[in-house]
Image (tube, grey):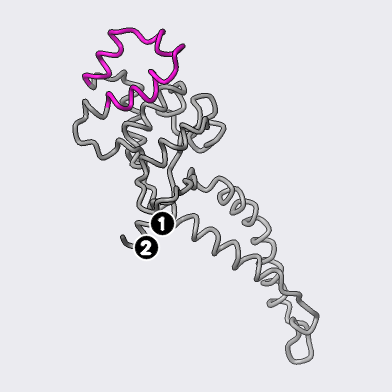
Amino acid sequence: MLEEEKKIDEYSLFLPKSPNSIFTDYPELKEHHSLSVLNGHEFMFVWYYACECSPFYKVSDIYKRAELALDRSFSASKHRAKSFSETQRKNYLSCKFPESVQNGILTMSSFRIGPRIKAVQALEIAFNNITTMISIEATDEDFMKGGEVDWAKKKNYIDSVKTASEVIPQLVDKMESKLGLVNVESGDDEDEDFGSKLDNYHEKGN
């Protein structure tokens, strides 16, 4: 397995920990109307059906994938299962989803974990470079040229510090959100597939 593939296997994207905390866990999703209009169970169905990190993503039979996603999202909740009519269930199993769910599927299927992992790594590098740059203590001698103050150099330094102070909080916000990435705990078996990891995660009551 390539190093990049190993890195991807360590993470999940927008992993639904609970139907009630999805938009709290991942504020970015609120920016996508097609996802923010979904209730928690609908979002979970969309995630299991369309997210490339879902254990069912590679199930080529769309009807089987719908069945598996449905069992994880609606049937997993007894209260929700009771309010889910037989007609609704048949429609889902026939891949005749409500328009809102279909739109959510299109949005979810557009997310890619690989570029997000690279983006988070780039953010960390940028943060380290910027904080290192402005952490260097500057003295009056640093701004002297020919025995006189080099005002242009001094202004450039002040502008750089000002820009860095504005950028750093933005970088921190992005780094803390991890762009929707969640580190998936590995089991004892290094070859354990992602589906098994996700099963274990939910079985632990998360």
Viewport quadrant of the N terminus: bottom left
Magenta region, mostly helix, strand or loop?
helix
Q: Position of residue 31 (x, y in %)?
A: 48, 34
Q: Secondary structure at mark 2?
A: helix
Q: Quadrant of residue 63?
A: top left
Q: Is residue 130 above or below residue 88?
A: below
Q: Quadrant of residue 91?
A: top left
Q: Position of residue 140 (x, y in %)?
A: 80, 80
What's under tag 1, amino acid-wise?
Answer: Lys
Q: Is residue 163 above or below residue 133?
A: above
Left or right of 165: which side holds 140?
right
Residue at left offset 33%, top offset 22%: 70
Left or right of 117: which side holds 105?
left
Q: Which residue is mark 2?
A: 3
Nearer the observer, 99 or 7: 7
Callout 2–callout 1 Cβ contact below 8 Å: yes
Please give the range of residues in magenta: 66-94
- Label of residue 7 in the image: 1
Left or right of 167: which side holds 85?
left
